[in-house]
Image (cartoon, grey):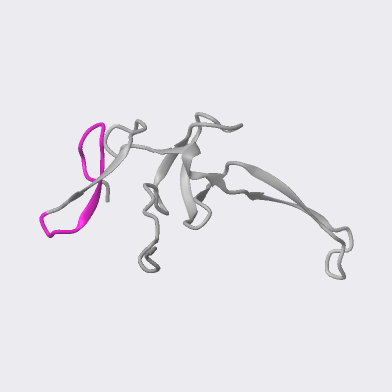
Amino acid sequence: MERKFNTQTKLKVRKGDTVRIIAGDDKGKEGKVLEVNVEKKRVVVEGFNIVKKHQKPTAGKPEGEIKKTEAPIHISNVMLLDPASGKPTRVGRKLNEKGKLQRYAKKTGQLIK
């Protein structure tokens, strides 16, 4: 029988982290994570994957408008930057002194806040 509780997946990237985009049109660029969608495994990175949305004319804006917004990117297409060196790194988890799981950079071994 399958467990029906505590099935939330743990992701390596959180809101506020600095990441490098490793695939897609914005490959090689770095930015800050604005939003993380755990169910769809997608992140929104500040200033990247910009899409245009056309708005119909309304009474307030008779000409209509074209809005530019950031679209989500799949989490596998971003890589966390090591806070110490600023280079991309894989992320692991280990117990700290207080017995809580803490993220750490596998490249340098430093804890990530």
**Which of 17/95 is in front?**
95
Q: Which residue is rendered at x = 42% and y = 54% of the image?
A: 15
Q: Which residue is rendered at x = 38% and y = 62% of the image?
A: 7
Q: Position of residue 60 (x, y in %)?
A: 83, 69
Q: Is residue 78 left or right of residue 87?
A: right
Q: Which residue is rendered at x = 22% and y = 45% of the image?
A: 111
- How many numbered discs? 0
Q: Which residue is rendered at x = 31% and y = 41% of the image?
A: 91
Residue 109 part of the magenta segment: yes
Q: Is residue 8 left or right of residue 69?
A: left
**Magenta stretch, overall SS:** loop
Residue 87 part of the magenta segment: no
**Which of 47/104 is in front?**
104
Q: Position of residue 87 (x, y in %)?
A: 35, 30
Which quadrant of the structure image shows residue 100? bottom left
Stretch in magenta: 97-111
Q: Is residue 108 left or right of residue 33?
A: left
Which quadrant of the structure image shows residue 57? bottom right
43 in relation to 28, above or below: below
35 in relation to 25, above or below: below
99 in relation to 71, above or below: below
Instruction: Spot the residue most to the front.
Output: 1
Q: Position of residue 42 (x, y in %)?
A: 52, 49
Q: What is the quadrant of the N terminus in the image? A: bottom left
Q: Is residue 43 left or right of residue 9?
A: right
Q: Position of residue 76 (x, y in %)?
A: 47, 40
